[in-house]
Image (cartoon, coloured by chain):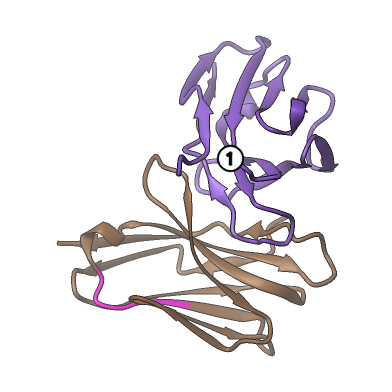
Amino acid sequence: SQQGEEDPQALSIQEGENATMNCSYKTSINNLQWYRQNSGRGLVHLILIRSNEREKHSGRLRVTLDTSKKSSSLLITASRAADTASYFCATDAAGGSYIPTFGRGTSLIVHP
Amino acid sequence: EAGVVQSPRYKIIEKKQPVAFWCNPISGHNTLYWYRQNLGQGPELLIRYENEEAVDDSQLPKDRFSAERLKGVDSTLKIQPAELGDSAVYLCASSSRTGAYEQYFGPGTRLTVT
């Protein structure tokens, strides 16, 4: 079963615009991670946010976490064509075995 | 630092045939994961190794899938016999230790069963 569910399933924007994607999950978590997957390539870890954190930044990425709503958002600012990829959130359940459970992903297309 | 290496990158077989995938994790990484990713889905864990011990294999279809990690380094995932529904990308990942959270993924093996 997939714990996290990303929304929207697909997003199409112009270069320079911001992209926001959301992740909702069902049970309490220890951590939430965001990964990127380019076409035909493996997943790359982007950022991890712990359950006691509310916001984290890494370069053009901003992640927020609202544990009361069981949701997270990933914001990519000033998007580039190279940001075109699928983005997955992965959660590991509180009290679990540190195994991240991935959602179905958001497919982002950035038009040059 | 070399990344996670997987081979082959692509494999096409007929149903009922056996197939094997190989993974070499990042040097020094004790934890190794095998995932299956179906088209349009996120990866789903098949098995996790701590060194040479399989510590989480509840999602591995044991009637046809097997895995091993000899000497706690390289790992092999085997399917015998393959079914049409096994067509997917098989991803290997490693992390320095359990609880390190950040996993490093290989490029995957795309399996097509005809």
Quadrant of the image occupied by residue A107: bottom left
Q: Is residue B26 magenta?
A: no
Identify the residue at image location x=46%, y=39%: B2
Q: Which chain is purple?
A: B
> Quick one: label 1, few (<14), some, or many (20+) residues within 10 Å?
some
Residue A94, quarter of the rendered image = bottom right
Q: Position of residue A89 (x, y in %)?
A: 56, 65
Q: Say if residue B102 shows up in the picture.
A: yes
Query: What letter labels the chain drawn in brown?
Result: A
The one of A21 and A51 positioned closer to us in this rendering: A51
Element type where label 1 sits in the image: loop
From the top left corner, tell me how far across and down residue A49 is, in percent.
59, 77
Amino acid type, callout 1: Ser
Residue, x 76% and y 77% (percent of image)?
Answer: A28
Span shown in magenta? A74-79
For label 1, the residue is: B27
Q: Give the position of the N terminus of chain B as an image quadrant.
A: top left
**Mark 1 — on which chain does it sit?**
B
As drawn, is B48 to the left or to the right of B104? right
- Quick check: A61 left or right of B72? left
